[in-house]
Amino acid sequence: MVGDQATTWRHPNVLQRIRKFCAHSLFILCVSVSLWFMPALFCAPARAAEWPRFRGPNGEGHAPAVAVPDKWTDQDYRWKADLPGIGHSSPVISGKLLVVTSAEADKSKLHVLAYDAESGQRKWQTELESPPLRMHARNSGATSTPAIDAAQVYVTGIGPKGYFVAALSLADGHEAWRKELGPFAAQHGFGPSPILHGDTLIVPNDQDGESFVLALDSATGKERWRAARRSGRASYSAPCVYEPAGRKAELILTSPDNGMTGIDLETGGLNWSLDVFPERTVGSPVVAGDLILANCGKGNGGHSLVAVRPPLAPDGKPELVYTLTNSVPYVPTPVVRDKLLFLIHDMGMASCHELATGKRLWNKRLGGNFSGSPVLVGDRLFAITNDGDVVVLAAVQEFKEPTRTPLGQTSRSTPAVALGHIYLRTQSKLFCLGGGAKVAGNLRVP
């Protein structure tokens, strides 16, 4: 009997039926698994940009540690590039593409340039018409930092018809859409930077003339809402988003004539406001837990920095937790690490404070003047002086002497960090540092 059973199992027809059964079962299993995971695959959001706006995600100026020494030499750069004209905007990075702007006032051109962030190879360059403007000596035609996502980069500037925002394809730099916003009146010229929240592009417009904040569909440029603002002194601060637990996200804007405001991101409706800025706002608001920090000033220095706690309930009122008035910045934006608040003053002072109370722990002179803002890279602060020296400072409770590395040219830009590299911009040059093996510079070395 055993021999007969063995012969039966070895019969070709039996074996063929077994193979078909196994193959059919495997097919059903694969289809079932695919159907189970398919919704997750198709609903997964596109990979977020590494450094999507001024000072990175939500404008906080935070980045993971990168393999960059506190001080370096000219031979340590991964790559370098010369930029046409001048500018003070910061680079933005999505995937492996870096985009930066520069302007030539005498040629009425705003350049938008895209580079491979790893190698420095230029991928494309788009020129937008930008007529010469009256502006502050420390401003430029390319001061506004773009916003970027996985498909497009969003650039603001002044064109023949006035203030505009344009979306350029990351694939080749062609203009996908443009929105004309009318005149921009300001004593110191143009400079507002847009931000993205999901698929909504936020375009601030606090100026001397008609003021408003605009929300656009990022893919098409279609207007979602427009919120009127009180006009007066132009603001150059970039907005941020406050996302309290259990409540809808709010857009945070700061200006001398509107104070600090929380705006409904879905409708543009005003949730709350607090009149806390007697002078112009240039530094941008920063979210730190349940506090929002923002500064104002005039001339060469800051007037005050405030810590505001937004309302805890939809019908509640905001709370002014504390105000700092000694050695606070006007243009540079604050940065927070854990329970510490760090400030770099326009005239070269640096200070460390308790975040919760504002109590000052130390106040030291760094030397040099600053227009760019510090960013936190791991446990170190990186900031560039107006003379182009990169100051690296330990972000700790006890002051440690900083290091300085010259870039060789004036800078009023803020560093960007992505892909394990730090990107440093002077008025007409771009440097990439860190991230392993160096790549030969694609243009002249300063």
Image (spheres, grey):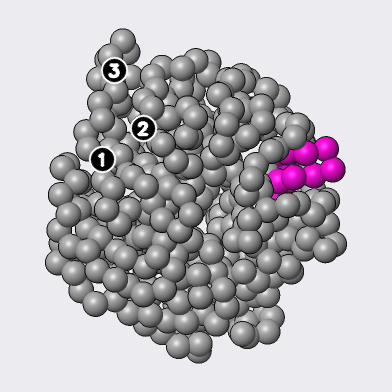
Q: Quadrant of the C terminus?
A: bottom right
Circle 3 residue: 317
- Confirm or deny contact between disc 2 and disc 1 (CB under 8 A): yes
Residue 24 visible to an observer of this rendering: no
Tag of residue 423: none
- Confirm or deny contact between disc 3 and disc 2 (CB under 8 A): no
Viewer-closest of 327 and 422: 327
Callout 3 secondary element: loop
| x, y percent for residue 437 | 48, 81
The image quadrant that residue 429 belongs to is: bottom right
Circle 2 residue: 276
Number of marks in picture: 3
Label 1 neighbour load within 10 Å: few <14, some 14-19, many 20+ = some
* Left or right for 137, reference 291: right
| Three-letter code for the amino acid on which mark 1 is drawn | Thr
Circle 1 residue: 323
- Confirm or deny contact between disc 3 and disc 1 (CB under 8 A): no
Q: CA distance from mark 2 to mark 1?
A: 9 Å
Viewer-closest of 62 and 66: 62
- As for residue 81 lying within the magenta part, the answer is no
| Three-letter code for the amino acid on which mark 2 is drawn | Val
Q: Quadrant of the N terminus?
A: top left
| Three-letter code for the amino acid on which mark 3 is drawn | Lys
| x, y percent for residue 255 | 48, 35
Mark 2 and mark 1 lie on one chain; the one further toward the N terminus is 2
Q: Which residues are magenta?
A: 157-173
**Outermost top residue:** 315
Q: Residue at x 53, y 64 (%)?
A: 412
* Left or right for 205, reference 221: left
Q: Residue at x 54, y 44 (%)?
A: 236
| x, y percent for residue 397 | 15, 61
- As for residue 162 lying within the magenta part, the answer is yes
